């Protein structure tokens, strides 16, 4: 863990000129509901509208002397993060997307002036193809989570959290592949071993949670979820598995109704549009409030990039 914490401190220095230190905002409304002091780490205000800008930037910067072309596959925030990093560093690369990727996300990536190609009708098919292509052509494949440089970049959120509120008792973080929570946990546990790291997942897509219970990465049937940023399978060799197993103190599963309610709550009381994956962490605090009465807790609001269809669902009952 110390080695990763040191990598995170290096990443903090490396990416600082290119990303924002996002605000840690006290939530009067959530604090009143939960009976504890609740803070929101507003990564929805990050460049590209997501924390993914951090890990992508750190990875691309680490390749500054590597002349190979960079490839990744993503249906959303990771692809946008890589596209942003490529534009900033003026490196060459291609973002591969499934044919059914949302038009809004495709346009956002193309606005960075980075090449986009389509392959397959699902994220898994697209990723498999892009990985193999990178291998065949001796190019660099950038994983959204299964990469220590990417994890270290995401972990810079932990550096900011400790700088902004060192007395935090717990941090609630959504989990997909585990890169975000692994990075945050590795740093915060290194400076405050007693801090609680709470992993938050949708009930409809609990892959890492079920894998930790099983003692290995397993394939878990999923249902549609508003938390699309955390949905999908996980690499069976991912380095995040051991980190999540060793560093996460507890897990909370949230229903679709709880996620939607949390998204509406943040829009109503904080005037922020947040993704379903961000709603998961807020919903988890409300679900666990009895355990944290009188404590200082933070929810990582990991992104704001929602489709028009989801935005309509959130807004209609506000």
Image (spheres, rainbow, N blue to C red):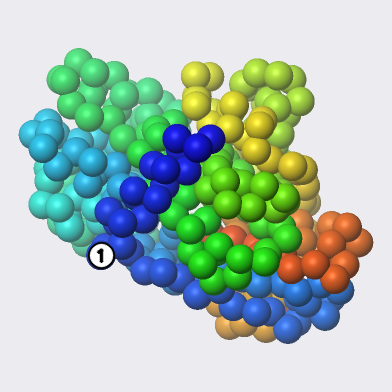
Image quarter of the C terminus? bottom right
Front one among 110 and 235: 235
Q: Which residue is mark 1?
A: 17
Which residue: 61% across, 66% down?
A: 166
Q: Is residue 318 left or right of residue 85?
A: right
* Above or below for 172 versus 126: below
Any part of residue 148 in sight: yes
Question: What is the tally of numbered marks visible in this picture?
Answer: 1
Q: Is residue 207 left or right of residue 122?
A: right
Q: Position of residue 2 (x, y in %)?
A: 50, 37
* Above or below for 318 versus 146: below
Any part of residue 52 in sight: no
Category of crowding for the residue at label 1, using alpha-carbon neighbours closer than 10 angstroms: few (below 14), some (14–19), many (at least 20): few
Q: Is residue 209 left or right of residue 99?
A: right
Front one among 226 and 207: 207
Q: Position of residue 279 (x, y in %)?
A: 65, 61
Which residue: 72% across, 65% down?
A: 297
Which residue: 47% across, 43% down?
A: 5
Q: Position of residue 91 (x, y in %)?
A: 12, 46
Q: Is residue 191 left or right of residue 295?
A: left
* Above or below for 60 versus 267: above
Front one among 281 and 113: 281
Which residue lies most toward the top here?
136
* Above or below for 295 versus 76: below
Q: Position of residue 239 (x, y in %)?
A: 50, 27
Disc 1 secondary structure class? loop
Which residue: 18% across, 26% down?
A: 139
Which residue lies most toward the left here?
67
Q: Quadrant of residue 107?
A: bottom left
Front one among 24 and 163: 163
């Amino acid at each position: 863990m110390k080695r990763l914490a040191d990598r995170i401190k290096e990443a903090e220095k490396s990416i600082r000129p290119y990303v924002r230190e996002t605000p840690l905002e006290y939530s009067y409304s959530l604090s009143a509901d939960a009976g504890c002091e609740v803070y929101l780490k507003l990564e929805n205000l990050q460049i590209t509208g997501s924390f993914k800008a951090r890990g992508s930037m750190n990875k691309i910067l680490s390749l500054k002397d590597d002349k190979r072309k960079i490839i990744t596959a993503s249906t959303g925030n990771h692809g946008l993060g890589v596209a942003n990093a490529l534009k900033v560093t003026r490196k060459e690369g291609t973002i591969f997307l499934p044919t059914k990727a949302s038009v809004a996300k495709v346009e956002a990536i193309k606005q960075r002036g980075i090449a986009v190609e389509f392959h397959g009708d699902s994220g898994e098919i697209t990723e498999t193809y892009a990985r193999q292509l990178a291998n065949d052509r001796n190019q660099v494949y950038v994983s959204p989570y299964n990469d220590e440089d990417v994890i270290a970049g995401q972990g810079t959120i932990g550096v900011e959290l400790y700088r902004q509120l060192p007395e935090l008792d717990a941090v609630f973080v959504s989990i997909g592949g585990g890169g975000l929570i692994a990075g945050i946990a590795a740093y915060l546990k290194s400076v405050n071993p007693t801090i609680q790291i709470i992993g938050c997942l949708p009930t409809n897509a609990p892959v890492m949670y079920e894998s930790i219970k099983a003692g290995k990465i397993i394939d878990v049937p999923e249902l549609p979820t508003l938390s699309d940023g955390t949905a999908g399978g996980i690499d069976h060799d991912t380095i995040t598995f051991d980190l999540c197993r060793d560093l996460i103190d507890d897990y909370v599963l949230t229903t679709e109704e709880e996620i939607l309610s949390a998204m509406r709550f943040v829009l109503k009381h904080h005037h922020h549009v947040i993704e379903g994956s961000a709603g998961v962490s807020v919903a988890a605090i409300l679900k666990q409030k009895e355990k944290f009465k009188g404590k200082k807790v933070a929810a990582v609001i990991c992104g704001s990039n929602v489709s028009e269809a989801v935005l309509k669902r959130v807004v209609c009952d506000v």
